[in-house]
Amino acid sequence: MGNTVIDGMIILATFTKHFKDEDFQRNRIKFIYNQIMNQTFQQKLDLKCKEHPEESVIFWCKSIDCQENRIFCILCQKLQKHYNHFNEDVDVINKLNQFFITKSQNLQSLLRECKIQYQSTLLSAKQLISGLEYKFCGFEDKINEFDINQVLKALESFILFDDMNDYISGHITGPLKKMQNIFDNLFSQLKLHLINYQISKFQREINKNEYQKTFSLSFSKKEAEAIKKLDELLLIEPYNLEIMYQKGNSLGKLNESKKAYEIYLDIIKINPQHELSYLKLGDLLRDEKLYYQALQYYNKCISINENNSAAFFGKGECLSADNQYNEALLDYDRAIKISSSNQVYLISKGHCLRKLERYEEALNIYEKILNSDSKNAEAYAGKGDCLRLQGKYSDAYQCYQQTLHINPYQKDLFCLIGECLILSDQYYEAIEYYDKVLKINQYDTDSLYYKAICLFNLGQYNEAQQYLVTADQLIPGNQPIKDLLFKCANSQKK
Ligand SMILES: [Zn+2]
Ligand SMILES: [Zn+2]
């Protein structure tokens, strides 16, 4: 490809991707119009030959097989570079503008036809789908009220429709998928994202500077402003992958995950080797707890760059969330092998080992982290968990205290500390921590129950009973609560 006909087509074809976004289209046309008005068409007459810079160009060539400079001077002509197809395909340079204009207008009318067909196809499809939904779906709640005629008609309709199932997937879903592939392939084959020839050197410099500014905006957490600027840049270069990627990241930081997700998908459609977009897609899906799909993107990312530690880490997190700790461990190890000082990776590996009950190994990792960062609350908490699970309650208690020292308000931690204290028979101290939880949420049933245990062990049966009654009302029928209530009642009688 790469001949002028195709190049000329690109400008207009670029618009078609934006059917859905009329504002975008209007702005962009306005922008390009202004740009064209600013350039003087006369410049064309002064074009110099690329091979003979001192000579003005005189001819241009449109032969599809031509391997020479398509716009050339009298010297090129004397060298007979276009000799074989001169008569059919070479013309004088002042007819080149007209060629662009004619080609562009022809394409415009072709695209107009495409657009009309596309819209009416879409309408028919919508009508068919909503018709099918009306007739065959969502009436489950009415079935019991059907009389015999309704049942007969429904049955008749469904039997007829059964026959159509294969037809629908064979004639609609399948071909639509094929069409989508055709669109996507054409987009990348015609390189519709590359429209550099429409942008002057001067404009490119401005864009570069403006793009740099978006980084500092993003850095000072002004994401909305950054996005506004990126959108302006995208008006000029709608498929600049760097700008698109940056916009995706800014949207992500604003929790606009869905929009960010779509941008990353657009990017990998244009460049199926865009490693970082696969990583981002994986991360977004992982946030949505869609672990299986996230894994696919991480794998794709790794297949492009096997040294992407973040992708290995993401895989580990997905597997770990799915309780596949042995598999997760392999990925954490890969991530750590690539970037050994990343504490987030180490913490996750520690947690994974703890889940596998490999406490000593986990403790080693937490120690390693604390040696280089004595303020790592998560490492203290992890260490505390290991010690608690090994039955070393007072050591665990110390670790949890360190965690609280760094990060004072953690409801889950209060409960764990309470548990350690109960298990070392320190009931008064334990109550202190359950009270902290109950101050945050007075209906926390676990804390109500455990506080009752403490009170029971301190011989305060009446008070224990009060907490148990509340807990029992919140989760009726809970056996441990019932048992303790029974014990309280018995102890009071004595
Ligand atoms: Zn020349
Ligand atoms: Zn030629």
Image: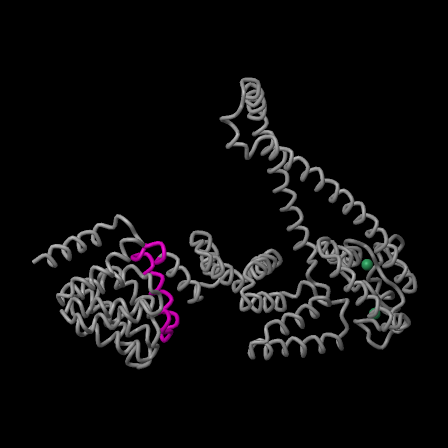
Residue 327 among those drawn in magenta: yes
> Which residue occupies the foreground of this view, 392 or 219?
392
Residue that appears at 79% across and 71% down: 51
**Residue 309, picture quadrant:** bottom left
The quarter of the picture showing ligand 1: bottom right
Give percent across and percent down for residue 282: 48, 59
Magenta stretch in the rendered image: 320-345
- Residue 88, compared with residue 168, is above or below; it is below
Residue that appears at 26% across and 77% down: 401
Give percent across and percent down for residue 312: 40, 63
Residue lying furthest front in this view?
493
> Which residue occupies the foreground of this view, 374 or 87?
374
The number of callouts visible is 0
**Residue 315, picture quadrant:** bottom left
- What is the basis of the colouring in this image? one colour
**Residue 125, picture quadrant:** top right
Give percent across and percent down for residue 135: 61, 30
Q: What predominant SS class does the magenta segment belong to?
A: helix
Residue that appears at 25% across and 56% down: 469
Residue 99 among those drawn in magenta: no
